[in-house]
Each structure stands twice: as structure tokens, then as C-alpha cells.
Image: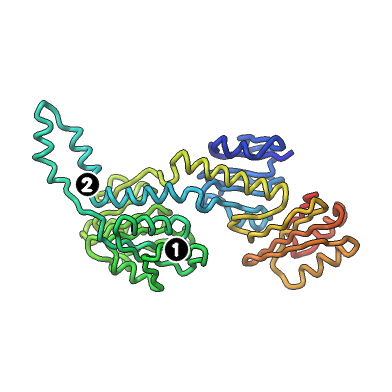
Amino acid sequence: MYNILTLNKIAACGLERLGDNYTVTDDVSADVDGIILRSYKMHDMELPASLKAIARAGAGTNNIPIDKCTEKGIVVFNTPGANANAVKELVIAGMLIASRDIIGGNIWANTLTGDDAAKQVEKGKSNFAGCEIKGKTLGVIGLGAIGILVANAAVGLGMEVIGYDPYLSVGNALQLNRHVKCVSDPAEVYKESDYITIHVPLLESTQNTINKDTIAMMKDGAVVLNFARGGLVNNDDMKEALASGKIKKYVVDFPDAETINQPGIIAIPHLGASTEESEDNCAKMAADEIKDFLENGNITNSVNFPNCSLPDDKLGRITVIHKNFPNVIAKFTDILKDVNIADMINKSKGDYAYTIMNTDHTVSEETAKQLEALDSVVAVRIIR
């Protein structure tokens, strides 16, 4: 029996995939094997000693103490691509509302009274005129699951599209519309684009990606869209650019005290993944990931440990989370010298690695403790 803690409301269709061998609770003081959450901030939370895995029903994981989890051997999963279509659609909507003053027009229309409202509409509509996005250039920074969908959709709407991603994978490149122009220098995106949308994770290296220097390279009257993370854009620099007219509009899905009720800023209340379909997709993927890890030891879509899976032969199985040191595997096999290792896989990610071993019989607790005693080992689990 496995115990799962939910820190946010998780779609029932996801939790149902766990099955009868799971108990789901919202009691933060409980001893649990796994946690499934959405945007709950875990940084001040005391992690249970029993905790083995955390699944974020969404892409961003900056609300989870990744380094702390890694040191404790807690695998953190996310659900890349599960909410990509929802975010893509909102990005397109963001471009449209930044180009056509739909919001202002709606607010004004709702103030009209009297039988001559239709005449007032015809007289005042010119105050809300805008421009079309067809024929304009969209710059996409970050061509991951969301960035690719946005780029392809923009091509379909008749836009010219420039994409920048220094880490573009082969798989993502194959999904990209052939009309998207990929560049190796982000300066080309800033200089050539009428609209710029950013889709990268918030890291120390990406914080304030949009700042006064990158804004200075942009076209006068450019529109910036941020549906990734608030910290990717320097708010002070953006407000200065809006006040000067350098930037026409800033559309942000992460409003805060600095961006709410500000001229030129269209603040959307974090609606990127707020669709029924997206929440269901994320919940299902998160449940599948944590279940496969707890029951089989397989890792898929982890942000702190390598993807690592091994076919299940239904015999013995042991997994080891360890430091990425030389000769570690030799030490494992030496301890397991009296056990026939039928199959094994080892993958590394940065300073850490993960090993799955299938054996011809169950490994004893005593042998597991010998593995745990190694300096390089963080956590050992006997799966069966």
C-alpha cells in the first residue's frame, strides 16, 4: 500500500489511475510515499522521511525545493507537454488582445445606455482600432513543447516566425513547421520581431532575460508576451519601456504588485493551464509517473534525476540513487556478487545517477544496507 499526499486539488481522473493499492490524503503531517501537487509552494515544508517522489501536475517546478529533494534522493517529476495546448491557445489570445483593444472596447461598450447604444457604438468604435497579426513577425524564445505549438500556430495564422533555442532537441525540431526560421543568436529575434513570446524555465541563468538591454534591441512598438514565468522579465525595465513607447504592450500571465493596474500591461491571472483538458492531462501524467516509479522504479520526466527505465521480468529488482562517481557500479556488483544480475541500466544527470538492477531473486535487506553504506549512495529501494 502506498500513501499519496495531494497539496492542491488534483483532477479525479488522474488520481483514479493510481488504483486500489493507493491511499490519497491531504494531511500534510502524514507519512507518505509520494506527493502530487500543482502550484503549492513547498520550500518551507518539512519533507517526510518516508517521501520518495514528488509529481508536479504542470511543467514549472520552481515551487519545489529541487536541491533539497535531490540530496535526500527524492525524485521530482513534472508533466511536460500536458498543458502545452492550453498555454498555446492563451498565447495566441494574448497576441490578439494586445493587437486589437478588445478589453478596452468591451469595458467601454458595457458603459453605454439608452436606445441609441448602437449609434454610440458606431461613433466610438474607432477609438479601439488595432492591427492584424497576419504578416507580422513573431519571435519565439524557447522551442520546447509550448514554444513549438505557438510557432506552428502562428505560421498557420499567416505570421512570419523566428525561433531561438540553443537546446533544441532533434524530436522537437522534427515537429517544428518548416517555415519557422531558427536562429543561433537571440539578438535576431529581438531585432526582427513585432511580437516576442518567451517559453523557457525560470533558472538563475534565465532570470531577467527580457531587460533594458534586450528591450533596446527590439523594434519600436513591439509587443512582449510572457506565459512562462514572471521572473523572466525585469518589471522595472519593462515599465520604463512602456512609458517611453518603446514597447507597445506587455502581456503577462503572472501578475503581481508591480504589474497590476499598470499602463500598457495586460495582466492575466495565471490562466495558462487553466482548462479542464489541461488539468486532466497533467493529473493523469503525474499519477502515471509517480505510480511507475513507486511500483517499478522507472523514472520518466524527472527534473532532478535521469530518465531511466528497464523492462520488468517480474523477478527481483533493486534501484539505487547515487552520486555520479567513477567505479560505483563495480562496487555495486561486488556487493551483489552472490546474486545473478539478469539485467541492469545506469543513467546519470549532472552530479547524480540512477541504477536499476533486475536479479534472479529478491535482494535481502542486509544486502541493501551494504549498498546504502557506500559513500556514494543516496537511497536504495528493493522494488521486489
Q: Quadrant of the N terminus?
A: top right
Circle 1 — which element? Answer: loop
Tell which residue pokes out farthest to the top in this image: 115
Q: Which mark is residue 214?
A: none
Q: Which residue sits at x=18%, y=35%?
A: 109
Q: Residues within 10 Å of mark 1 (few under 14, many from 20)?
A: few
Residue 196 versus residue 102 in the image, above or below? below
Residue type at mark 2: give it: Asp
Q: Which residue sits at x=65%, y=37%?
A: 29
Rendered location of residue 260, percent (x, y): 32, 46
Rendered location of residue 285, percent (x, y): 58, 46
Question: Quarter of the image holding residue 324?
Answer: bottom right
Q: Which residue is mark 1?
A: 206
Q: Which residue is mark 2?
A: 101
Residue type at mark 1: give it: Thr
Q: Residues within 10 Å of mark 2 (few under 14, many from 20)?
A: some
Left or right, residue 257 beside residue 296: left
Rendered location of residue 253, percent (x, y): 38, 48
Left or right, residue 76 beside residue 323: left
Residue 78 versus residue 117 in the image, above or below? below
Residue 360 versus residue 115 in the image, above or below? below
Q: Which residue sits at x=9%, y=29%?
A: 116
Question: Quarter of the image holding residue 245?
Answer: bottom left
Instruction: Name the front one of labels 2 and 1.
Output: 2
